[in-house]
Amino acid sequence: MNGRALLLWLVLVLVPVALANAPTGCVLIKNRYMDKYLVSSTSYDAERRHVSLDKTGNQHWVIRRDGANYRITHGMLKEELYESDKTQNGNYIFTWTPRDRARGRGWKITQSEQGYFHIKNVKFGHCLWAKGMLTNWVGAYANCDSNKYEWKIISTTCRN
């Protein structure tokens, strides 16, 4: 393949990925590796709730543009999804209950493969990931290199 043909091939392959926009509005967020949905879970403390995975898609999220990035809010709780600096084999992911002071709440959402997205925290540069088959734990880690980091974002009806 000559240089021009290679360049044309790269442009045709890479440009659609770069230009793909994440669905916005009410969505379900499903991990590719675990085949489970992102949900808000138990309280961690007075200001934060854990985020985990569940087989049922009974909790929706709201994704909205925030400049060049996105913000993700739990649909019913109205709490922002954010990455904490608290770490144990990856940073913890919480929803922030005060709803007004969330740090680490901006996200870049980029298409990884047709129909799947990486959700990367702007502040830390870590991708949202599913830890593994033995746990429903969700964290954020510097890699974005497997289907544990890939999420299907499915438009849905808002439920209040």
Image (tube, rainbow, N blue to C red):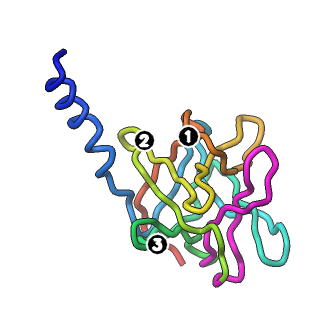
How much space separates mark 1 and mark 3, taking CA atoms? 29 Å
Alpha-carbon neighbours of circle 1 within 10 Å: few (<14), some, or many (≥20)? Answer: some
- Whether 16 is drawn above or below 64: the answer is above
Is 64 positioned to the left or the right of 46 in the image?
A: left
Q: Quadrant of the N terminus?
A: top left
Looking at the image, residue 70 lies above or below residue 124: below
Point 73% across, 53% down: residue: 91
The residue identified by callout 3 is: 158
Identify the residue position indicated by label 1 in the image.
144
Residue 78 versus residue 108: which sits nearer the camera? 108
Q: Residue at x 44, y 65 (%)?
A: 69
Q: Would you identify the image quadrant in which residue 109 lies?
A: bottom left
- Which residue is most to the front? 3
- Region of the chain picked out in magenta, as a range: 78-100
Outermost top residue: 1
Depth check: 25 or 127 in front? Answer: 127
> Residue 155 lies in magenta, yes or no?
no
Q: Quadrant of the C terminus?
A: bottom right
Q: CA distance from mark 1 to mark 2?
A: 9 Å
Query: Of label 1 and label 2, which has the lower sequence position?
Result: 2
Which amino acid does the dot numbered 3 rest on?
Cys
Disc on the earlier residue, 1 or 3: 1
Q: Using residue 80 as the reference point, say whether residue 1 is left or right of it.
A: left
Q: Amino acid at mark 1?
A: Cys
The span from disc 3 to disc 2 (Cα, nearest Å) is 26 Å
Q: Amino acid at mark 2?
A: Ser
* Outermost residue, right side: 45
Is 70 on the left-hand or right-hand side of 105? Answer: left
**What residue is pinned by disc 2?**
112
Residue under the image location 21 percent in, 36 percent down: 12
Q: Are marks 1 and 2 in contact (CB under 8 Å)?
A: yes
Q: Which secondary structure lies at badge 3? A: loop
